[in-house]
Image (spheres, helix red, strand yellow):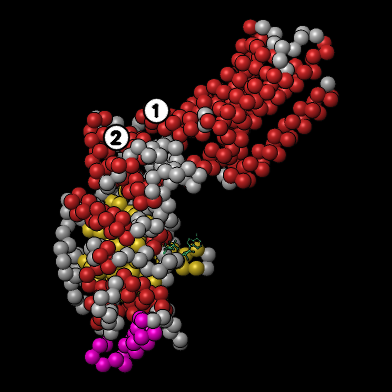
C-alpha cells in the first residue's frame, strides 16, 4: 500500500501511523481499547435544564452503491458546541441532514431527549444551511421582522417579539446594516458575513433548543469567522442551546472554541470526544503535532492524506461522554460502533414519541397577512421597477401616437383591431413572463422556510396571488386609461369593458406564468416553454380568425 502525503506532515505521519498500527513502534504504540477500558473525557460536561440532548446511534446512509455514512454514533449536549470536521465530501452535511430529519436513514436511530426525530420535533430545531437564501429586495430588518412575526407564536405580544428581535440584532452585531437590502448576484446588498449572521439571526429568533449550522464560516475572513464562532459559543453556553456545526478548516483560535469534536473520514467516525483531547489522542497513536502548528490543519492533513489507514486507526477509539461511551470494533472491512450506557448495558433505550408540540407557531391568518405583506414588498420592486415603468410609458406613448384619434370609419377598422391586438398581447404576456421567472427564483427560500415549518402552503399560495394582484393590475389599468382615449375608442361604457378584459387578461397571463414556472422549476426551461406557449396561442388566434 502506498501512503501519499505532502510536506511537512503527510508521508511522515502516514508511515508512522501504519507502523504503529501493525504494532512496530516502541514506546509510542497505539492503545487498542476494548469496551470496559475507561478514560473519561475531562472538562465541564454540565447537563442543563434547557436545550435537548441528541443521541444518534449506528447511522447508515447509502446512495446507490455508495455508503455515505457508516455506523456513526454520538451525542450532542446542551450548553456545548459540537463541531463536525472532515475533508470535503466526507459526509458532514449528510450527517447534519440526518440529525435534522431531512435525509432518510438506511439504518440507525436519532433521538432528542429520548424522542425520535419526527415532523413536530423538527419544527423545534433550527438549521442554518450552507447557502444563505433570502428575498433580495427586502432589507435585513424587514427580513428579520417578517421572520419574527411568522415564527413566534401569536400569543406573544408584539412588543415582546420586537424586543427579542432587537436583542438578536445586537447579539449578532448586524445593527449597522439593518436597513440595507439583502441583495443577490444582480443587485449588491449586505456582505457575505452579514448574510450569514442574518441566517443565524432568523433561526435564533425562535429561541430553538437545538441549532444546526452547516459551514457557518465558509467564505468569511479570519476575524469575521472567529468572532462569529465566539458569538455562537457564548449564546450556546449562556442560553444552554445544543449546537452542532460542520466546519471545514478552522483557525487554531477557532478550533479551541468548540467543546466537542466529531471527526469524519469518508463517512466513518475517526474521533469523537473533547476537542481539547484530540491532539493527545493522536499523540498516543504516535502522531505528534509539530509545535506552533494549527491543530485543525494537522487533523485535516491526517484525514486527507492517510484516510484509508485512519479508518483503521479509528477502531482504537473508545469515547466517554458523561453517561455514554462509544465502543468501536472492526467487522471484516467495516467499523461497528455501539453506544453503551456507563452502567455497562448496551443502550436499548426505546425512543417513544412523547412530543405533542403544536404544528405551526402562528395561525393561518397571521401567516397569510405576513406573507402577503412580504410578497407585496418583494414583488413591488420587481413588477414596478423603474425600468418596467419606463417600458410601459414608452409603449403607451408609441401606441397613442401611432393610432392617435382614429376616425370612426370602416377604413380604420383594421387599425383599431391592431391597437387592441397589441394591447392584449402586451398585457397578457408581460405578467406571464414575469410570473414564469418569479417562482423558480423564490423556490429555494420557500423550500428552506417550509422545511423548517414556518407556514402552510395554502397561506403562501393565497398570499402570493393576492399580493401580486394589485401590482399586476395597476400598469395595464393606467396603460388602457391613457391609450384608450388617445386612440379615440368608443366612449365611457366600452372603456370600462376594455379595462375589465385587460385585467382578466393580465390575471390569466400571471396564472399561466406561475403554472409554467412551477411545472418546469428551472428558469431557462420555463422561459422556453413560455415562448412556445405564447407562439402557439398567437397561431391559434390567427387560425381561428381565418376559419371565421
Ligand atoms: N443524493 C446523493 N446521491 C449520491 N451521492 C450523494 C448524495 N448526497 C451526497 N452524496 C455524496 O456523499 C458525499 C458526502 O456529501 P456531503 O455533502 O455530506 O459532504 P460534506 O462533507 O458536507 O462536503 P463539503 O464539505 O464539501 O460540503 C459526497 O461525496 C457526495 O457526493
122 in the magenta segment: no
**x and y, in percent, of residue 237 in the image:** 19, 54
Can residue 359 be seen in the rendering of this structure? Answer: no
Q: Residues within 10 Å of mark 2 (few under 14, many from 20)?
A: some
Task: Look at mark 1 in the image and give the residue it sits on.
Answer: 369
**x and y, in percent, of residue 361 in the image:** 32, 37
Q: Residue at coordinates 32% horizontally, 88% vertically from top-left?
A: 20
Task: Determine whether 242 is above or below 377 in the image.
Answer: below
Is residue 535 toward the left or the right of residue 374 in the image? right
Task: Determine whether 36 is above or below 348 in the image.
Answer: below
Q: Residue at coordinates 79% horizontally, 14% vertically from top-left?
A: 413
- Give the farthest residue toward the top: 492
Task: Look at mark 2 in the image and give the residue it sits on.
Answer: 153
Task: Determine whether 494 is above or below 87 in the image.
Answer: above
Q: Secondary structure at mark 1?
A: helix
Is residue 306 toward the left or the right of residue 502 in the image? left
Q: Which residues are magenta?
A: 8-29
**x and y, in percent, of residue 271 in the image:** 30, 72
- Mark 1–mark 2 CB contact (< 8 Å): no
Q: Residue at coordinates 57% horizontally, 39% vertically from top-left?
A: 437
- Say which quadrant the C terminus sits in: top right
**x and y, in percent, of residue 286 in the image:** 28, 84
Task: Determine whether 306 is above or below 95 in the image.
Answer: below
Is residue 439 toward the left or the right of residue 276 in the image? right
Q: Residues within 10 Å of mark 1 (few under 14, many from 20)?
A: some
The answer to which of 365 and 419 lies nearer the viewer is 419
Q: Residue at coordinates 24% horizontally, 43% vertically from top-left?
A: 170
The answer to which of 4 and 83 lies nearer the viewer is 4
Can residue 415 be seen in the rendering of this structure? Answer: yes
Amino acid at each position: 500500500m502506498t501512503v501519499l502525503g505532502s510536506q511537512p506532515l503527510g508521508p511522515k505521519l502516514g508511515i508512522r501511523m501504519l507502523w504503529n498500527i501493525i504494532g512496530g513502534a516502541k514506546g509510542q504504540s497505539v492503545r487498542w481499547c476494548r469496551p470496559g477500558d475507561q478514560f473519561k473525557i475531562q472538562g465541564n460536561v454540565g447537563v442543563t435544564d434547557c436545550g435537548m440532548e441528541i443521541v444518534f446511534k449506528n447511522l447508515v446512509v447509502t446512495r446507490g452503491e455508495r455508503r455515505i455514512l457508516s455506523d456513526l454514533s454520538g451525542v450532542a449536549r446542551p450548553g456545548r458546541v459540537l463541531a463536525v470536521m472532515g475533508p470535503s465530501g466526507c459526509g458532514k452535511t449528510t450527517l447534519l441532514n440526518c440529525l435534522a430529519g431531512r435525509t432518510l436513514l438506511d439504518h440507525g436511530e436519532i433521538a432528542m431527549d429520548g424522542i425520535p426525530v419526527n415532523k413536530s420535533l423538527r419544527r423545534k430545531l433550527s438549521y442554518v444551511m450552507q447557502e444563505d437564501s433570502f428575498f433580495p429586495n427586502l432589507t435585513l430588518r424587514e427580513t428579520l421582522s417578517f421572520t419574527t412575526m411568522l415564527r413566534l407564536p401569536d400569543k406573544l405580544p408584539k412588543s415582546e417579539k420586537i424586543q427579542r428581535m432587537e436583542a438578536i440584532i445586537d447579539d449578532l452585531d448586524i445593527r449597522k446594516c439593518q436597513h440595507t437590502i439583502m441583495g443577490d448576484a444582480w443587485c449588491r446588498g449586505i456582505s457575505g458575513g452579514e448574510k450569514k449572521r442574518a441566517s443565524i439571526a432568523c433561526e435564533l429568533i425562535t429561541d430553538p433548543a437545538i441549532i444546526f449550522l452547516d459551514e457557518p464560516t465558509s467564505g468569511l475572513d479570519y476575524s469575521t469567522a472567529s468572532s462569529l464562532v465566539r458569538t455562537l459559543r457564548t449564546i450556546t453556553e449562556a442560553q444552554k442551546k445544543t449546537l452542532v456545526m460542520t466546519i471545514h478548516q478552522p483557525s487554531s483560535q477557532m478550533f479551541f472554541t468548540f467543546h466537542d469534536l466529531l471527526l469524519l473520514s469518508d463517512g466513518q467516525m475517526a474521533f469523537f470526544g473533547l476537542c481539547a483531547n484530540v491532539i493527545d489522542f493522536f499523540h498516543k497513536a504516535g502522531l505528534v503535532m509539530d509545535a506552533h502548528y494549527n491543530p485543525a490543519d494537522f487533523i485535516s492533513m491526517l484525514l486527507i492524506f492517510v484516510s484509508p489507514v485512519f479508518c483503521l486507526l479509528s477502531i482504537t477509539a473508545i469515547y466517554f461522554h458523561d453517561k455514554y461511551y462509544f465502543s468501536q470494533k472492526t467487522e471484516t472491512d467495516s467499523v461497528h460502533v455501539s453506544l453503551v450506557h456507563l452502567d455497562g448495558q448496551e443502550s436499548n433505550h426505546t425512543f417513544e414519541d412523547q412530543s405533542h408540540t403544536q404544528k405551526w407557531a402562528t395561525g393561518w391568518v397571521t401567516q397569510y397577512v405576513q406573507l402577503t405583506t412580504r410578497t407585496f414588498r418583494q414583488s413591488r420592486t420587481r413588477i414596478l421597477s423603474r425600468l418596467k415603468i419606463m417600458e410601459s410609458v414608452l409603449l403607451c406613448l408609441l401606441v397613442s401616437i401611432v393610432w392617435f384619434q382614429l376616425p370612426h370609419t370602416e377604413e380604420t377598422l383594421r387599425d383599431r383591431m391592431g391597437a387592441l391586438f397589441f394591447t392584449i398581447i402586451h398585457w397578457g404576456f408581460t405578467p406571464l413572463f414575469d410570473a414564469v421567472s418569479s417562482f423558480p427564483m423564490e423556490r429555494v427560500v420557500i423550500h428552506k422556510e417550509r422545511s423548517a415549518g414556518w407556514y402552510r402552503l395554502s397561506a403562501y399560495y393565497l398570499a402570493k396571488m393576492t399580493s401580486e394582484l394589485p401590482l399586476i393590475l395597476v400598469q395595464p389599468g393606467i396603460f388602457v386609461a391613457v391609450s384608450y382615449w388617445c386612440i379615440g375608442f368608443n366612449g365611457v361604457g366600452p372603456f370600462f369593458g376594455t379595462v375589465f378584459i385587460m385585467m382578466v387578461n393580465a390575471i390569466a397571463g400571471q396564472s399561466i406564468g406561475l403554472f409554467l414556472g412551477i411545472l418546469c422549476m428551472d428558469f431557462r426551461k420555463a422561459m422556453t416553454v413560455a415562448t412556445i406557449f405564447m407562439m402557439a396561442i398567437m397561431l391559434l388566434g390567427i387560425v381561428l380568425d381565418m376559419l371565421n
